[in-house]
Image (tube, coloured by chain):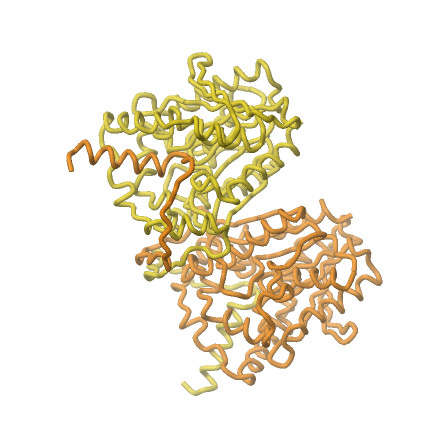
Chain colours: A orange, B yellow
Amino acid sequence: MTQNSIRFLTIGRLAVLAVAIFAISTQVIAQDGWTLDARSVPPPAAVSKELHDAIAGAPKPDAATQWGMIPDNDDGWRAMQNATAMMPLDPMAEQFGVSVEKKVIAGVTVFAITPKEPSTAHADHVFLHVHGGGYVLGGGNGSATEAIMAAGTIGMTSISVDYRMPPDHPFPAAVNDTVTVYKHLLKSHDANAIVIGGTSAGGGLAMAAVHRFKELSLDVPGAIYAGTPWADLTKTGDTLFTNEGLDRVLVSYDGLLDAAAKLYADGTDLKDPLLSPVYGDFAGFPPTYFVTGTRDMFLSDTVRTHRKMRAAGVIVDLNVYEGMSHAEYLMVAASPESRDMFTGLGAFLKQHLP
Amino acid sequence: MTQNSIRFLTIGRLAVLAVAIFAISTQVIAQDGWTLDARSVPPPAAVSKELHDAIAGAPKPDAATQWGMIPDNDDGWRAMQNATAMMPLDPMAEQFGVSVEKKVIAGVTVFAITPKEPSTAHADHVFLHVHGGGYVLGGGNGSATEAIMAAGTIGMTSISVDYRMPPDHPFPAAVNDTVTVYKHLLKSHDANAIVIGGTSAGGGLAMAAVHRFKELSLDVPGAIYAGTPWADLTKTGDTLFTNEGLDRVLVSYDGLLDAAAKLYADGTDLKDPLLSPVYGDFAGFPPTYFVTGTRDMFLSDTVRTHRKMRAAGVIVDLNVYEGMSHAEYLMVAASPESRDMFTGLGAFLKQHLP
């Protein structure tokens, strides 16, 4: 090709790419996708020192190391659950200025968390918290940890549901236990004084529970907190692929997620909205606060649900943190990002709860 | 190790990863980052057929092919600009139901775009549009394309600034031309009846211009539309790295972006808020509508600016589209996502402009 024809081709290509193009007519060729080359990714630069150092100091995410020993039998799951159920809560309660009381409400174990310095704005409000952990982990004492952070930072009384889990109690036990505690709270609270929420499976369960409240003709709560929600138990979201190996928490779908989805669903269609709330009807949902990060494998689940709720006319607020993997605002609890997340949630609740 | 000690290690690791963890004390080891393995990424599944097919039919993003022939001299830039400046506008104007008139306002070339079916809600409003193209491309007729889509879809009169560009007119010519047209509009409009915005460099320029309006003690406009804004001309945002080779439009920082930043800045510090508005003070900024996608290399620029504005008390609305590369809502103009973006922007403007 001559110099001029090369320039002409280049100009044409740049025109296509750099300018808003009207009516590209693409010859569609079915493709399985693109194979991206290996690449080096530095720690995110525009985050707090605390978050940067946590990421820079972490080993390269590796599914085989982190998730390679998922149990293949029920006893293995029970042993794992028992271990995580025993984590001490006192140091965390002390740091966040709350008291924690384990109780049973209509047969469901909960942790009642009371801030020592409650916010007057939230005197009549209660946070109904449902924990994360893929519906298979994070129970027992672990179920209270996020609620302790929220109760202390926001100054709101919280009730964290230690819902039953598989292998002994698969879906819909978690939903049913959440409904039980919600009905109990409705005896002492207006529905719109209750915020329901959590992170990961907790964010998904919160939205699934609201789908269930609608089925039961219960009033919906006043707000939802959907922290990087597991909104789709099928392997569909784009960031499950694009952020694989980059999200240092989830690492890969072919780790905890695949195993947990199957164990929890117990044969129910994974697209059932009570399992994968993104597939439900969001009409009548209350104001919802979404949180995720640019490295989060659930970035897609979060933004897909956000857009579906918008389309249904729901008040939504999407918060995406730079460089953050799945649920890292819980794991790097001393970071400004973590505090910002909870104070932002508190401000949202002040605005939308009566 | 015994079976039991392996199980114990696994349990400990899962506890750390799956549960909210209190006070992880990480031994920080300075790292250059992680080398991610090559991986196959399918086209995004949970997007419209139109967007899916456009992505599935596109070749694998390749910086050498798409950006390998960036000019290395001024004549090369001028030739490229001249070519993209001549794109026909009539078919697009016809489709979006607008008329287009090229005018000169106080020495600045603009395109005045009038919808044939204006929205009564926007009868008193005007969209001051600034085009994208890395500050070095997208001028001439190309500058009007996004404004035609916005004017037609929203039903709002638009003025698109064909601002001067390098190599002949580097920074701050683009900012100055935008100020000139804004001052002209202020003769016939209340400031808060004007929305300023654009995509990519246009989104960045819109915010840079508002920083400049504040310096000049001009009233700020009523709203900003920041479409996947180039808010930081330094190579800082995390998704410049994580979405490299995945964003099929920008592909790599080491293509148009690096060359354009240097050519436009012309020696000015790249962290000057009039070049990289994310580094500015957002106090007093008007309500701002952000748009980006999960595959967008400017996802980080978008969410970083979104959080800075929130922290400054600005009303903000963040919209992240599943599976979308940089500015794809302009390139796949026939997609539901594109229409959703402009109608969502229109709804935001109805809410926030008086």
Where is residue A125, by image quadrant? bottom right
Q: Position of residue A319 (x, y in %)?
A: 57, 48
In the picture, measured across the screen, residue A354 lies left or right of residue B311, that is right
Residue at figure coordinates x 37%, y 33% from the top left: B134
In the picture, measured across the screen, residue A112 lies left or right of residue B250, that is right
* Res. B228 visible in picture: yes
Residue at figure coordinates x 47%, y 17% from the top left: B180
Where is residue A175, by image quadrant? bottom right
B271 or A295: nearer the eye? Answer: A295
Judge whether B160 appears above or below B204 on screen: above
In the picture, measured across the screen, residue B86 lies left or right of residue B155, that is left
A145 or A224: nearer the eye? Answer: A224
Judge whether A231 appears above or below B331 on screen: below
The number of discs equals 0
Q: Position of residue B129 (x, y in %)?
A: 49, 27
View extreme (right): residue? A187
View extreme (left): residue? A2
Residue at figure coordinates x 41%, y 45% from the top left: B297
Q: Position of residue B66 (x, y in %)?
A: 29, 42
Judge whether B260 appears above or below B62 on screen: above
* Res. B30 visible in picture: no
Say which quadrant the N terminus of chain A sits in: top left
Q: Position of residue B336 (x, y in %)?
A: 52, 44
Residue at figure coordinates x 42%, y 40% from the top left: B331
A89 or B332: nearer the eye? Answer: B332
Judge whether B8 appears above or below B194 on screen: below
